[in-house]
Image (tube, rainbow, N blue to C red):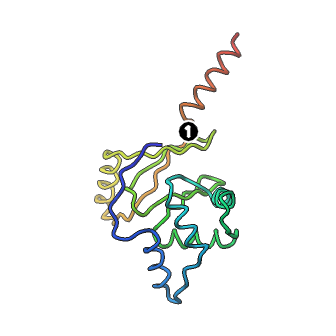
Amino acid sequence: MNVLPAVEVSQTPEEKFREYLASRPRPQRFTTQQRDMVQYIFSKHNHFDADELIDEMKGESFRVSRPTVYRTLKKLVDAGLLRKINLGTRTVYEHDYGYAQHDHLYCEQCGTMIEFQDSQIDNLISDVCQQHQFQLVGHSFIIRGVCSTCNRARMTKRRLDLV
């Protein structure tokens, strides 16, 4: 995975989430499980699904319930802290707060996600939005295919089949 530049932010993810919960029509309290989740999720930068998060946190002795994880992930997306990415039958999450806009290469064989930025793509999107007088809020661009590792493995198998 390429390391993307961090974007300077004025609040920590925990502070931003607390503010989000307090500003709801019916303010909600910030629970210990939610705090643990926010701290755990933002302690590393990776793409994950809900089940992976539950397994990893339980493996590190955190007490998290499945319903709380699903509810909190939805709130973290609504608060602008996480981005939800649909990959067919699988939904993964990634940091949205404090990270530059970027796109993805997704290997349909092994599930690897490679993050990248390209100014030409950004310029093209901006031009198309201007042509249509469209106010851009964000975008999600996922290129699906087969990564170099899986491609090499497939090519090796083909050569062996010819022997």
Q: Position of residue 57 (x, y in %)?
A: 64, 60
Outermost residue on the top side: it is 163
Q: Residues within 10 Å of mark 1 (few under 14, many from 20)?
A: few
Classify the position of the C terminus by image quarter: top right
Q: Quadrant of residue 120?
A: top left
> Residue at horizontal 51%, vertical 55%?
44
Residue 117 falls left or right of residue 151: left
Q: How many marks?
A: 1
Q: Position of residue 162 (x, y in %)?
A: 69, 12
Residue 90 falls left or right of residue 147: right
* Residue type, mark 1 in image: Gly
Q: Quadrant of residue 127?
A: bottom left
Task: Say which element carries label 1.
Answer: strand
> Residue at horizontal 55%, vertical 72%?
35
The residue nearer to you, when weighing 118 against 57, is: 57
70 vs 43: above or below = below
Q: Position of residue 124 (x, y in %)?
A: 32, 49
The residue nearer to you, when weighing 136 against 53, is: 53
124 vs 50: above or below = above
Residue 1 falls left or right of residue 56: left
> Residue at horizontal 60%, vertical 32%?
150
Outermost residue on the front side: it is 61
87 vs 160: above or below = below
> Residue at horizontal 43%, vertical 74%?
15
Q: Quadrant of residue 98?
A: bottom left
Q: Which residue is mark 1?
A: 145
Q: Position of residue 59 (x, y in %)?
A: 68, 57
